[in-house]
Amino acid sequence: MERLIKGKLYFDPNFWIFKTHFPGYPVVPGTMIVDGFVQEIEKNFGFSYLDIEILDFKFLRFISPGKYPFKIYSQDRDVICTLQDNKGTIISKGKVHLKNGTKK
């Protein structure tokens, strides 16, 4: 079954990590981007994070805190995730697999 989910990931500029990553030039850590996608997959597909296998993620440029549009496209248990800037340019992309675990 195919699905396309669109939304926005929000990285709060007041979150404490941005005071240290990096001082004067806050950059969203890649782990926060991946975690944002995992949370969206949990919410929209009903799978636990324990059943989400991260196969590949690429970060194409640094991003600062704020809101970014995303797309999650699934075909069966393979899921493609893309994060874009406000001009529609892909700034991060990844592939995950939903394992045969039980849904939440």
Image (cartoon, grey):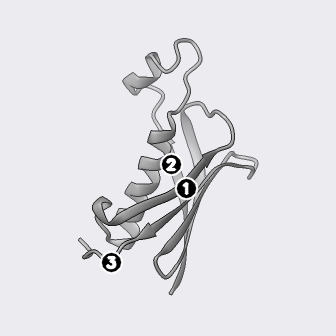
The x, y position of residue 9, in whole percent, is 50, 48
Q: Which residue is mark 3?
A: 100
Does 17 appear above or below 92?
above
Name the amino acid type tagged 1.
Asp
The x, y position of residue 84, in whole percent, is 66, 50
Which residue occupies 38% across, 22% down? 16
Does 102 appear above or below 50?
below
Q: Nearer the viewer, residue 80 or 66?
A: 80
Q: Disc 1 to disc 3, how far (Cα)?
A: 19 Å
Q: Which residue is mark 2?
A: 9
Element carrying mark 1: strand
The quadrant the C terminus occupies is bottom left
Mark 1 residue crowding within 10 angstroms, few (<14) / some (14–19) / many (20+): few
Please report whichever mark, 1 or 3, sits nearer to the chain's N-terminal start. Answer: 1
Q: Quadrant of residue 93?
A: bottom right
Q: Which residue is mark 1?
A: 56
Q: Nearer the viewer, residue 37 or 101?
A: 101
Most extreme residue toward the bottom, as rendered?
1
Please report whichever mark, 1 or 2, sits nearer to the chain's N-terminal start. Answer: 2
Most extreme residue toward the top, as rendered?
24
